[in-house]
Each structure stands twice: as C-alpha cells, then as structure tokens.
Amino acid sequence: MLLEIKNLSLQYVRGKKIISALRDVSLTLDKEETLGLVGESGCGKSSVAHSILRLIPANEGKITHGEIFFEGKELLQMEPEKIRQIRGKEIAIIFQDPFTSLNPVIPIGKQIEENILTHSLKTSSLQLKEKIFSLLEEVQLKETERIYNSYPHQISGGQRQRAMIAMALANRPKLLICDEPTTALDVTVQKEIMELLMKLQKNLKISILFITHHFGLIGLYTQKLAVLYGGEIVEEGSTQEILKNPQHPYTQSLLKSLPRKSFKKEKLPVIPGSPPDLSSLPSGCIFHPRCPKAIEECKKKVPLLRELKKFNRKISCDLAPFS
Ligand SMILES: Nc1ncnc2c1ncn2[C@@H]1O[C@H](COP(=O)(O)OP(=O)(O)O)[C@@H](O)[C@H]1O
Ligand SMILES: [Mg+2]
C-alpha cells in the first residue's frame, strides 16, 4: 500500500465558529492505482489533499484526529524537515489554477529548475537544461525553447497546466495529487490534459489521487472511487461498480445531475437544497435534509460507514441496499 489515511478529522476555526471540515475519513491507495475523490464544492476534497501534504496553516486549521501513512511512514507526526523532503519529491500536487502555483515573474524553465534543485542540489547546469527540455517534451509541449523562456502569462491555459504537470513530475513522485486539474480549462483542452495524465500515470507507474466535483471525469479515469459529502465518506468502492449501481442517495443524486456528455461545459451538479453547514451539522444522517429517500429514523440515527457485501463497497446509509 502506498497511501493509507486512517480516521482523519480536521477542523478550521473562523472567528468563533468551528468548521468540522473532515470527520473520520479513511482512504487507501495502492501503487500505480488511481483513486477518485468526488463531491460538491465545499465538501472537503482539497482539505484531504492539503492534509496529506501538511499544508493546513496552523492558525487556520487543525487535524484533530487520525493518521496518514505514506509507504508505511506516518506523515502527520513527521518532522517538518522530513516532510519538506517528501513534498514535491515523493508526493506532488497540481492545482486547478496553475496561476496559484506558478510564480508570475519567473520564466517556466527557471521554475522547473528551482523545483529540481530543491531536491537534488548536485545537478550540473547542462544536465538541468536537458532534463527540463525532456520534461517539457514528456508533457507534449511543442516549441520547448519558447515555453522554457516564457513567463506564465505568455502561454495558454492548457500550456500552463502542462508546464505544471512537468514541474510536478520533475522529481519523479510516487504519488500525484490532482486537485480539480482541468476545471479552469475548456472542454477540448480538458480532455487532452486528462489523457496526458493517464498516459503519464501508466508510463511512470505512479499513483494518482484525482479530485473533482465532476463525475464524468472520474468514470473515465479512475479505478477506485470515494464519494465525500459534508466532510464524510458516504460511499466507496470500484468506480465502475458504483457508477453502474450507485447505492448512497447522495451518489445517486450526483449521478442524476450529471450532464450526459462527460466533457460538456461543466456545471455544478444541481441537487435540491445545499450542502450542510459544517459549523452546525444536522442531526442523524447529515444528508437527510436533502435526501429523497429519508424517513423519520434518518433524522435521529447517525449511520456508520459499513461494508455492503452484496455490492462490494462501503456505504453510510442505513436504508441501503437499494436494488
Ligand atoms: N483555511 C480555511 N479556513 C476556514 N475554513 C476553510 C478553510 N479551508 C476550507 N475551509 C472550509 O472547509 C470546508 C471544506 O473545504 P475544501 O476542502 O476546500 O472543500 P472542496 O475542496 O471540496 O471544495 C468548506 O466549508 C470550506 O469553506
Ligand atoms: Mg477544492
């Protein structure tokens, strides 16, 4: 097993409010596996990613419970120096908007170079340049010389995302976290980037944690799937099986709201009602206020994530299975 998240709980503090952003989240990811993490905006997807990389600012949030093992080593208790060696080297991340991670005043080539040098100081400048060019080619960027010398604003959105991928892969990570990597791009470019990512995943034999609010992408590109709602995992199993026969009413609603063509201009799924207020959670099942199948009991009893053998998955709904 490459990554194991065990019972992760995370709280943010905003003024007097405590936002319970993640509660008891457990996930596993094997070597060379792709895991999709899906859910509406605000359900805690990025919080999972930031927890793995220890990027939660201490004055904003706190992991109150849980463990995260990467190749058997626990990350949450690790010395900051050791985490820095893992971040960007063993585990890399790409974000939705490359502008948040690319420095606007440094040319692309130079930024990739800095990323390489952070983790291997001894590379000669000739080797470095060759390495950067081959990385740019690896992500299928043409005009490598121009891209190398360009500032981020001088290249297109798709090119920027490719440059980001090149940077993320520069140190040959074992795990790549993609946090809504194509959300800001138009439909055709989105598809190209996803296909590039999947090709690289196979060639480089890396694992990918793929975060999105868009079910269409998950179906095409991941093996396993975890559905997050209001900071909790509500359904988890093989992507194909869940898509074929979703069991949690939330997953069912998400799928129903999916536009028919996967790459159609994205709209947020429209499920009646809104996600729970994480600073004052509903009683019982947190999905009950929006659930078309809810009964009286659902307002009172908190469902546990449990094995649903018949459907080969885990689910947190006491009313399941629905055949
Ligand atoms: N730094 C922060 N301070 C306070 N609240 C935050 C912070 N980051 C995220 N949140 C809140 O935590 C919840 C989960 O956020 P996030 O993990 O970004 O969700 P997602 O990536 O699924 O959209 C949201 O309610 C969000 O408003
Ligand atoms: Mg997010």
Image (tube, rainbow, N blue to C red):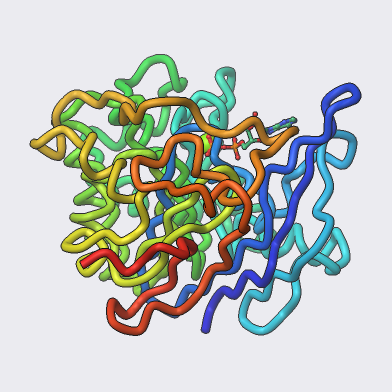
Q: Quadrant of residue 272?
A: top left
Does residue 194 lie above or below 308 as drawn?
above
**Residue in the image at 46% along x and 30% along y:** 98
Q: Quadrant of residue 248?
A: bottom left
Does residue 209 lie above or below 151 as drawn?
below
Depth check: 132 or 124 in front?
132
Point out residue 192 in the picture as x, y percentages from the top left corner.
18, 41
**Residue in the image at 50% along x and 24% along y:** 99
Residue 110 visible in the snapshot: no
**Residue in the image at 40% along x and 62% along y:** 319
**Residue in the image at 56% along x and 27% along y:** 100
Asked if residue 161 lies left or right of residue 281, the reply is left
Residue 125 visible in the snapshot: yes
Q: Where the C terminus falls, by quadrant?
A: bottom left
Point out residue 227 in the picture as x, y percentages from the top left corner.
42, 54
Asked if residue 212 lies left or right of residue 177, the reply is left
Asked if residue 103 lies left or right of residue 220, the reply is right
Depth check: 158 or 239 in front?
239
Point out residue 123 in the picture as x, y percentages from the top left corner.
60, 60
